[in-house]
Amino acid sequence: MFKDMMPSFELFMPSDLDNAVQLAKSSGDGGWCMAGGNDSLDWFKDRNKRPVAVIDLTGIESLKGIRETADGIEIGALTTLTEIENNPVILEKFSLLASAAGRVASPQIRNSGTIGGNICQDTRCWYYRAGLDCYRAGGETCYADTPEGMNREHCLFAADRCVAVSPSDTAPALVALDASMVVMNSDGEKIYKAEEFFIGPDIDITRMTVLKKGDILTAIRIPNTWAGATFYFEKVADRNSWDFALVNVAAAMKLNGDVIEDIRIATGGVQCVPKRLTVVEEVVRGSARNEETAKLAGKSASRGATPLNYNHFKIPLLENLVMRAIRDA
Amino acid sequence: MSGKLPTKDMVLGSGTDAAGKSEITTDLMIGISRFGASRRDFIKGIIATGASVSAGFMLSGCSQESAQTTSSNAATAPAPGGVERLISLNVNGEVRRVDVLPNETLAMTLRYKLGLTGTKLGCDRGECGACTVLIDDVALYSCSTLTHSVRGRSVTTIEGLQGPDGALHPVQQAFVDELGPQCGFCTPGQVMAAVALLKVNPKPTREDARKAMSGNLCRCGAYDNYLNSVMRAVAQA
């Protein structure tokens, strides 16, 4: 009965970060850092990724927890989504992130899934996940971006050979909150703004984030800039549980009366990275928060969208979600 | 369950009879009937004793083949710093010693090495909830948890809910009273999710319960019945 389990690997369970960084470096291309395991085990069970060494990070206590800092908060990358959903500090200052974390997958997955894993997770394009030799897998074709390809869940914007999308719900929230990601490797620590952390095919078509083998995301920092702002998060998916977003939207607004003084709005499920809707921000900044502004915001969100054969519905969906974000927040 | 689990001696026989034939068969039959053990108990006894006697027999397939075909001896000895294979797991309040491969999921260990087949495999990829167990009272998918990562934590399966005298857990009783399940296959997972909910929130609303159970699918569509059962458990508490 064990004939159908995942391929063998060495399992390392370091209890401190330095050990983990060393292991990640020494295992090189054959290494795989794993947090909750919800993404990793899918790959292993399908046998489409076969690392030699799996480095389980869940024993590293220093990577867990939510701490207030002088100018914001710092969230350990190995903090579970359930913890984030229920954390009093996050609920008080950055409830946008709590809402987003609470809509990820299912309760059991949120109990083991981590925020680091959620933002670093690989895309869900079924052709890519099936192990086919597409561009993202290092090959020279795309199976989704074809007349017959099943691409209802794929992108609207910035297709560059690959049309897969960013699947994370917390990533757009972190972009809207102006978060930074702390990455550690054997050369030391580096900090990336959220918008730099997620990368597109112009940088490297085989990766969703800046992380390479040997890198470990250790923490996410959120500045107080948008603390206590007016937030809106909505995720639309085929089912109310489990499913990845067809489109999601995360918005933070600073209101002065009914005037939108400042706004950050980002969307997932429409591009290979969480897309910051700078056009919407410019259109809406300084305007009164009313039906007219909301509708205009929605229309401006879909500017530049080039739908694929089966994902036209994402255009009105995106427009409506952005409209709601302005009007109903 | 009535009767004792058969012991290794009882199963493997204590010797041969006068004709030189092994007494295994006779002992087996006597063992089953004398101690009132059911066939289910018997098989569980084999699994429980077999695991510590020769873990090798359970491991045909991937790992042993790969040990022969790759240069790393991953399947037989840990690399420096790699995990030790023989570990102690705290399952349902008991310490169980078990040989665990690095790539073994908790569902596999529970079902095939510890004889705890109450935890079901529906999809084996974290998409159905049938394998739900409690780790330190938190509901997780055992199919998506490497067994090594739960060393040192308490694992509770459906088998661990009943009271010491065999009385059903209040949630189980409520599921029975309210006729929650239909075919029963998703039921262990549903029960574990409900138990996890009530540990955190003993007085949930129906909406709270719906959200808490949203990680468990039911192909029979008994969702409403399960919610009624959970609300009954809440009311009866």
Image (spheres, helix red, strand yellow):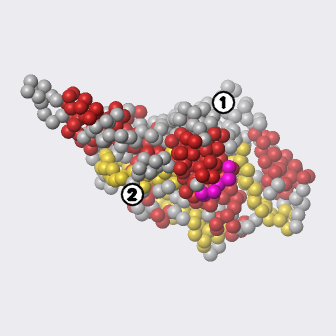
Residues at circles 1 and 2 in contact by the CB criterion of under 8 Å: no
- In the shown orientation, is residue A231 left or right of residue A72? right
Q: Which residues are magenta?
A: B201-206
Where residue A104 appears, x then y in whole percent? 63, 49
Inspect the image, locate mark 1, and give the three-letter code of the amino acid beneath it: Met
- In the shown orientation, is residue B214 left or right of residue B48? right
Residue that label 2 marks: B152
Q: Name the quadrant of the N terminus of chain A.
A: top left
- For disc 2, the neighbor class at 10 Å (few under 14, some 14 to 19, many from 20) is few
For mark 1, name the chain.
A
Q: Which residue is drawn at the image coordinates 43% and 45% (left, top)?
A: B159
Q: Is residue B202 magenta?
A: yes
Q: Is residue B82 visible?
A: no
Secondary structure beneath dot 1 equals loop
In the foreground, A160 or A217: A217
Where residue A301 appears, x then y in whole percent? 80, 48
Which residue ends up furthest to the right in the rendered image? A292
Q: Is B107 placed above or below B26 here?
A: below
Where residue A21 appears, x then y in whole percent? 43, 59
In the foreground, A310 or A244: A244
Q: Which residue is drawn at the image coordinates 68% and 56% (left, top)?
A: A99
Q: Name the quadrant of the C terminus of chain A.
A: bottom right
Where residue B194 appears, x then y in whole percent? 57, 49
Residue that label 1 marks: A150
